[in-house]
Image: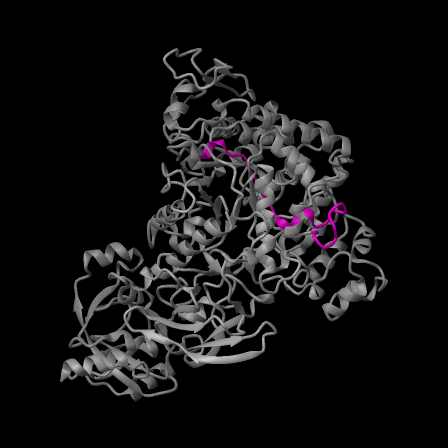
């Protein structure tokens, strides 16, 4: 009879447990009374089916798991189970290191299936006798993994989430194990409601599924969930789009029913065209571009294509001709800033504010909330208004800040749906147009001979909770986001709502999404935003999955170590040092900072410009008066040399004092500079979308009396380091044209005025107005001083911009002229590369690298018949 009762408990989705605990009985009123009179924490974690961890500061001689089916504030307690204290199991300590000091308890269940507890609000109550002295809301995301993904044929083994067409039916599947009920809401192409159908729950997987016939008019759909949500702490009923969406309506309001293999979703020739081959990762030269920046202000691009996917199909425009020049010189890979569905740009074009719009239109859109609305002529365009301002005034930035939430621009680090192309770059955001045009863009770049990489942001979402742009946190509330171990608040160290990629189903969503982009959109590589917030093992397994559909796909990303996951606090991270030897590339800040003259995050480095004092690679020798200056200078030189040699841990240099230094002996902000064991481990760069552009960074730091020509030469020389370095060069679009953002540090949301790139070479976009106050107001006095003191030496004309481009093209040609510039193994670098002009008596400022192909060591394999040595 008890066995039957247990099965009944598991089957009844509306019932929150069935078996009360006979050994401890506390009234729900005592729990509610305590909760209403005391602030609640979330310092209890359900980490395994039978184990709960409780923070050591939580009061209680004994503890009880209690569940409220309608929430602690709205209904009576439905179950309670005693928690018995146990030693923390070693495997739990290993799996959850951030909870290693917590106390462990085993749930006394009498074999009852506890999954139903998660459909209400479970709490852990601490007791002193029969008095309630603590109540903690229970975090149970890890337990969901144990219940639903720890065995064979579980939720993580399901291959067809989302929409799959099979024969005469269309199949829908969504993982929503804590939902009480899920229905499929169907809509036609006009988004008129057709029907709402009940879905069926598989108790073992937590998957809700439904098959419908293909011969029906439904095109759009959403899931309607009845579910307890921790944000409101009560049951909610709402509709939400599919986290596995492959197609969306404008502004992500509806998912749509499509098959990416359907010819209607493909441009002509899509299935037969292929990506350019990649012989080895180090052969790449990567060019990072924002789709909007590429053509958004270009008059040679048709108006309908400007700033959109379509711009890449117009071969005779200025941006495409420039890109062809780069490709012919040696560029191999085009890196797209995020191009999946984002939350910050209105995809309905008539709702967007553009620089070509009138002041009247813009001010109507922002409800006349800015001072410029009362001063400018209503019929004047925003561009004309901005051009009329004194560039040393704050007027231009004030206009841009007023419209930035409603303009047509954002970098895109604000994901809503991970596996659908962004609609604002399409000529029509509704339905399949964005899919076709994204594929046209990829196909066009491939046919030029360029591989295509896409920036992906699986480490956070744009929104969470009940927000209209929240998806994951509505499907399985509390699961997909990483939360503070005591408060339960979503961690936001990345900027936004951090995802818990260490959880199985979030990791699966990431992996499944990557496979779609690689297989169905022919994306050749992925750049991972804040990759250090993801587990190393997940990155490796995701790459394995992608390699099954695209064997030469390359992964790289930001391996920074910070936030709540820092120093492997929750798992072994995908950071620079932990990815050593994996051939997953990480951006190397070592070379970047040595070349640029300091970290971008230290204000004092900028302030040196107030006295016209240079720093870093261009420090004047007569400024090296103190031993500290000399030591810093020598260390920067060694950081550059090490960067040119692939930033290898084991590479050796001869120091000024005659001692031999390995890569790990050279200092970088108190840490070993060398961390790589393979040249494909490092992405070498001196500029990318983050922080000031290379040109602006230089103007902050250069002596005021440096000539314009020397400023250009120094800028180009800075670019030579990543281009000639072992490892993979990475170029920020427009750097070869002396690109400026008028000193703006973080231009993610500040439109085409500050982000424009002129491929006609007339301007580098310098001194277009003081940068927006939100990011740079503290620097305004310094910017004004240096622009005045520079006396125009920081202004470049078309001749100098073209000269800079020509020099960079030459450097690309040199790199691609010999395989010696892209050595494939650590052993080759160690045996072939050496630096001259090192040790005692070296001449300051002169870096000489030799790449041997048998001239010095005849035993070396001949890699290039044209050269015995390159210097």
Q: Considering depth in this image, is 610 or 419 the residue closer to the camera? A: 419
- The residue sitting at 33% across, 85% down in the picture is 32
Left or right: where 764 falls relative to 731: right
Question: In the picture, residue 189 is in which quadrant?
Answer: bottom right
Q: Residue at x 15, y 80 (%)?
A: 3
Identify whether 258 is placed above or below 338. Answer: below
Residue 7 in view (yes/no): yes
Q: Quadrant of residue 33?
A: bottom left
User: Does residue 705 appear anywhere in the picture?
Assistant: no
Decide: is 455 above or below 75: above
- The percent position of residue 405, horizontal first and vertical second, equals 65, 63
**Residue 795 on image: x %, y %:** 75, 36
Is residue 212 toward the left or the right of residue 54 in the image?
A: right
Res 108 → quadrant: bottom left
Which quadrant of the figure contains the N terminus? bottom left
Residue 181 location (% of width, % of height): 39, 79
Q: Nearer the viewer, residue 471 or 738?
A: 471
Q: Nearer the viewer, residue 744 or 631?
A: 744
Residue drawn at x 32%, y 64% as measured from the top left: 155
Q: Which residues are magenta?
A: 281-306
The question of residue 146 being in magenta is answered with no
Viewer-closest of 764 and 353: 353
């Amino acid at each position: 009879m008890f066995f039957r009762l247990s099965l009944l408990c598991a089957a009844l989705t509306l019932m929150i447990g069935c078996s009360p605990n006979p050994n401890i009985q506390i009234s729900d009123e005592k729990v509610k009374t305590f909760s209403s009179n005391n602030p609640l924490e979330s310092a209890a974690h359900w980490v395994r089916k039978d184990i709960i961890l409780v923070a050591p500061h939580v009061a209680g001689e004994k503890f009880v798991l209690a569940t409220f089916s309608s929430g602690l504030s709205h209904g009576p307690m439905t179950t309670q189970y005693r928690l018995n204290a146990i030693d923390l199991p070693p495997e739990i300590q290993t799996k959850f290191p951030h909870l290693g000091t917590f106390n462990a308890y085993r749930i006394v269940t009498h074999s009852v299936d506890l999954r139903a507890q998660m459909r209400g609000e479970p709490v852990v109550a601490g007791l002193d006798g029969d008095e309630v002295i603590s109540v903690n809301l229970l975090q149970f995301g890890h337990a969901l993994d144990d219940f639903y993904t720890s065995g064979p044929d579980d939720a993580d083994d399901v291959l067809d989430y989302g929409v799959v067409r099979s024969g005469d039916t269309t199949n829908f599947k969504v993982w929503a194990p804590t939902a009480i009920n899920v229905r499929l809401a169907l809509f036609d192409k006009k988004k008129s409601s057709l029907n709402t159908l009940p879905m069926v729950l598989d108790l073992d997987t937590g998957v809700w599924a439904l098959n419908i016939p293909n011969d029906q008019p439904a095109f759009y759909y959403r899931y309607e969930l009845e579910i307890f949500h921790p944000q409101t702490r009560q049951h909610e009923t709402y509709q939400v789009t599919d986290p596995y969406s492959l197609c969306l309506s404008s502004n992500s309001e509806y998912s749509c029913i499509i098959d990416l293999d359907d010819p209607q979703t493909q441009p002509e020739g899509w299935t037969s065209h292929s990506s350019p081959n990649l012989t080895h990762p180090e052969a790449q030269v990567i060019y990072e571009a924002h789709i909007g920046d590429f053509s958004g202000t270009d008059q040679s691009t048709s108006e309908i294509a400007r700033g959109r996917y379509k711009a890449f199909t117009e071969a005779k425009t200025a941006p495409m001709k420039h890109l062809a020049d780069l490709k012919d010189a040696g560029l191999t890979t085009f890196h797209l800033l995020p191009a999946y569905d984002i939350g910050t740009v209105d995809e309905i074009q008539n709702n967007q504010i553009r620089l070509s719009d009138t002041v009247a239109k813009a001010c109507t859109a922002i409800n006349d909330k800015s001072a410029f609305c009362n001063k400018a002529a209503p019929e004047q365009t925003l561009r004309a208004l901005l051009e009329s301002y004194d560039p040393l005034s704050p007027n231009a930035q004030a206009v841009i800040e007023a419209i930035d939430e409603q303009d047509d621009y954002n970098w895109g680090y604000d994901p809503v749906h991970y596996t659908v192309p962004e609609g604002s770059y399409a000529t029509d955001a509704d339905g399949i147009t964005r899919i076709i045009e994204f594929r046209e863009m990829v196909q066009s770049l491939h046919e030029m001979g360029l591989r295509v990489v896409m920036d992906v942001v699986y480490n956070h979402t744009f929104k969470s909770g009940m927000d209209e742009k929240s998806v994951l946190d509505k499907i399985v509330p509390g699961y997909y986001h990483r939360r503070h171990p005591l408060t339960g608040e979503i961690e936001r160290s990345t900027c936004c709502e951090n995802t818990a990629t260490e959880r199985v189903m979030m990791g699966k969503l990431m992996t499944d999404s990557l496979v779609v982009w690689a297989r169905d959109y022919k994306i050749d590589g992925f750049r991972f935003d804040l990759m250090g917030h993801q587990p190393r093992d997940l990155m490796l397994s995701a790459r394995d999955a992608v390699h099954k559909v695209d064997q030469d796909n390359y992964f790289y990303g930001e391996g920074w170590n910070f936030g709540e996951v820092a120093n492997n606090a929750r798992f072994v991270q995908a950071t620079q040092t932990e990815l050593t030897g994996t051939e997953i590339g990480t951006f190397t800040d070592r070379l970047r900072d040595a070349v640029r003259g300091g970290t971008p995050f230290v204000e004092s480095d900028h302030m040196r410009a107030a006295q016209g004092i240079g720093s870093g690679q261009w420090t004047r020798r007569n400024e090296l008066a103190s031993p500290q200056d000399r030591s810093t200078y020598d260390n920067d030189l060694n950081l550059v040399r090490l960067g040119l040699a692939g930033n290898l841990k084991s590479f050796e240099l001869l120091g000024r004092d005659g001692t031999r230094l390995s890569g790990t002996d050279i200092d970088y902000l108190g840490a070993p500079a060398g961390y790589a064991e393979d040249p494909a481990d490092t992405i070498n760069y001196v500029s990318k979308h983050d922080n000031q552009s290379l040109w602006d960074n230089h103007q902050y730091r250069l002596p005021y009396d440096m000539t314009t020509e020397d400023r250009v030469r120094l800028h180009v020389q800075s670019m030579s380091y990543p281009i000639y370095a072992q490892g993979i060069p990475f170029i920020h679009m427009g750097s070869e044209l002396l690109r400026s953002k008028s000193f703006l540090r973080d231009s993610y949301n500040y439109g085409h005025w500050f982000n424009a790139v002129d491929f006609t070479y007339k301007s580098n976009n310098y001194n277009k107005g003081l940068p927006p106050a939100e990011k740079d107001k503290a620097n305004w006095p310094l910017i004004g001083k240096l622009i005045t003191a520079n006396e125009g030496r920081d202004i470049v004309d078309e001749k100098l911009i073209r000269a800079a481009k020509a020099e960079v093209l030459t450097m690309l040609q040199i790199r691609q002229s010999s395989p010696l510039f892209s050595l494939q193994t650590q052993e080759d670098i160690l045996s072939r590369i050496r630096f001259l002009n090192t040790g005692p008596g070296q001449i300051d400022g002169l870096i000489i690298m030799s790449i041997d192909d048998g001239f010095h060591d005849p035993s070396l394999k001949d890699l290039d018949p044209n050269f015995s040595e390159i210097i």
